[in-house]
Amino acid sequence: MKQPNYAQLQTAIDRKGYRFFQQGDFNLNLIGIRSADTRANRFNDHLAVAWRFGGAPHCLVFAATTDPGSYWRQHPVQVNGTAILVPGQYAGLWQLGLHRGQYRALVQRAPARVYRDNNRDRVLDFDGSIEGGLFGINCHRASASHTSQQVDRWSAGCQVLANPLDFALLMALCERAAPHWGSQFTYTLLEASDL
């Protein structure tokens, strides 16, 4: 999947009828892009952050996963299946906080909708039941020391960046934005076909 730029992300979000933040400096748009590849355990998705500074558009795109790794598909935490975030826009989904009490990340504070994949195989299933609520769908990193190649246990439904330096940059942008726009962040999950 080719990495999108600011204009392509804005166009895709506008087409969906979602909100795209353009006013002021560091008014961040956090955007996940789910790959059409439904095989498990790969960082084959992207997480983008788009913003303006001094009127100029900026965009960074990071390797990520928007779906759970194989381990959690084969060993679901919930009896009704592993959570896979449903594409859409989630206003104020995340706030600055601690991921599992361990390190600074973006943690779920508003309801989200998830598919429940319960057949324990290595392929994403988007035809199961859908639930809404608070499930701990956070945005965090995989390894603290290196770029991860496989999702494994790093995601049970969270949006996870493969590279810890990318994640540190994302968090620095969120910390920079928070004094002006608040510590809550809207997240939009798109599919690659939306671009």
Image: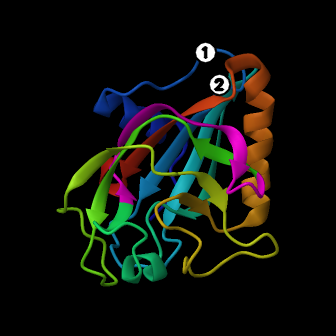
Magenta span contains residue 77: no
The residue at 54%/36% (across/down) is 109
The x, y position of residue 142, in whole percent, is 67, 69
- Magenta segment boundaries in residue numbering: 84-103
Alpha carbon distance from label 2 to label 1:
7 Å
Name the element at disc 2.
loop
Q: Is residue 29 above or below residue 101?
A: above
| Three-letter code for the amino acid on which mark 2 is drawn | Asn
Q: Which mark is residue 89?
A: none
The x, y position of residue 29, in whole percent, is 56, 34
Q: How is the image coloured?
A: rainbow
The residue at 30%/82% (across/down) is 120
Q: Which residue is mark 2?
A: 27
Q: Is residue 150 above or below residue 6?
A: below
Q: Which residue is mark 1?
A: 23
The residue at 62%/29% (across/down) is 184
Left or right position of 123 against 173 = left
The x, y position of residue 43, in whole percent, is 53, 72
Q: Could you tell me which quadrant the N terminus lies in?
A: bottom left
Q: Is residue 31 above or below residue 37?
A: above
Disc 1 packing (10 Å; few <14; some 14–19; many ≥20): few
Residue 119: quarter of image? bottom left
Q: Is residue 40 above or below residue 32?
A: below
Name the element at disc 1.
loop
The x, y position of residue 30, in whole percent, is 56, 40
